Image (tube, rainbow, N blue to C red):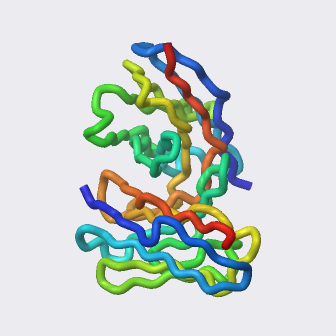
């Protein structure tokens, strides 16, 4: 199975900050990676897929990139509604696997 | 718009089985694969399997023999059956739509169904 690790596990930030979250795959997955946002008690919400494609309706302050097996989610200017947990998911092979999550909290 | 509506919370005893339903609306139910994912308290999301528009299924090794996915196309509803429940199966169970066949993300999720396993 492909393992995904995320860093950091927890991040304290303020409104307006630039936030970067990293996801690393244990082996090559091409660009077949998605990012989801999850708020407490809610289902995950798709933000980005194929590493850098913004899902329809997602604000442009969210962006994604890839370098080899390392993927990055960037929020250019953190907004109050962005405080949540973010998960990466690999879509290259089965079983589908998710990262452990990065919780973005108020500083 | 595309919507997935799941059945309500369940409380089960160890050894029992549970069925969670997922009713789709706003699109052609047989055109997309339905994926199932669960999340135990404080844990990461865990993939449980899928059922395609043709009714084909696939499960991870970790759930082989315990999970069964079915669907009723006339009711646009998918079902997840999990048997031989144990306390570690306490989790929120989600259905999600796969956008297209292949390396596709999950673009629409149900609201989740809490399954509690307790004696």
Q: Nearer the viewer, residue B51 or A85?
A: A85
Quadrant housing residue A66: bottom left
Location of the C terminus of chain A (image quadrant): bottom right
Frontmost residue, B91 versus B65: B91
Q: Residue at x 60, y 72 (%)?
A: A12
Q: Position of residue A92 (x, y in %)?
A: 33, 65
Q: Residue, x 51% and y 81% (percent of image)?
A: A64
Q: What percent of the width, then of the height, locates residue B119?
A: 49, 13
Name the residue located 68 percent from the left edge and 39 percent from the top edge: B5
Q: Is residue A73 left or right of residue B113?
A: left
What quarter of the picture does the N terminus of chain A occupy?
Answer: bottom left
Tell me residue B81's x, y (percent): 46, 26
Compared to A80, does B109 lie above or below? above
Viewer-proximal residue among A30 and A103: A103
Q: Where is residue A30 drawn, in percent x and y?
A: 31, 76
| B71 vs A64: above or below | above
Residue at x 42%, y 71% (from the top left corner): A7
Rendered position, B119 above or below B108: above
> Which residue is most to the front?
A107
Q: Is residue B35 left or right of residue B4?
A: left
Determine whether B93 is above or below A25 in the image.
above
Query: Which quarter of the picture shows residue B64?
Result: top left
Q: Number of callouts in the render?
A: 0
């Amino acid at each position: 199975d492909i393992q995904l690790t995320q860093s950091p596990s927890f991040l304290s930030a303020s409104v307006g900050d630039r936030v970067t979250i990293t996801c690393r795959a244990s082996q090559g997955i091409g660009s077949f990676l998605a990012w989801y946002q999850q708020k407490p008690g809610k289902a995950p919400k798709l933000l980005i897929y194929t590493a850098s494609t913004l899902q329809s309706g997602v604000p442009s302050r969210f962006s994604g990139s890839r370098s080899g097996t390392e993927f990055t989610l960037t929020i250019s200017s953190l907004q109050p509604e962005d405080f949540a947990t973010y998960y990466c998911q690999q879509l290259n092979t089965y079983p589908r696997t998710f990262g452990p999550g990065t919780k973005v909290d108020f500083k | 718009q595309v919507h997935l509506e799941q059945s309500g919370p369940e409380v089960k005893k160890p050894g029992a089985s549970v069925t969670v339903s997922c009713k789709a609306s706003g699109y052609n139910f047989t055109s997309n694969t339905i994926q199932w994912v669960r999340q135990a308290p404080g844990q990461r999301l865990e993939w449980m399997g899928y059922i395609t528009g043709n009714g084909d299924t696939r499960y991870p090794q970790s759930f082989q023999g315990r999970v069964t996915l079915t669907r009723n196309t006339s009711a646009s509803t998918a079902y997840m059956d999990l048997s031989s429940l144990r306390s570690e199966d306490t989790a929120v169970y989600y259905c999600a739509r796969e956008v297209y066949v292949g390396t596709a993300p999950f673009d629409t999720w149900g609201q989740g169904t809490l399954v509690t396993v307790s004696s």
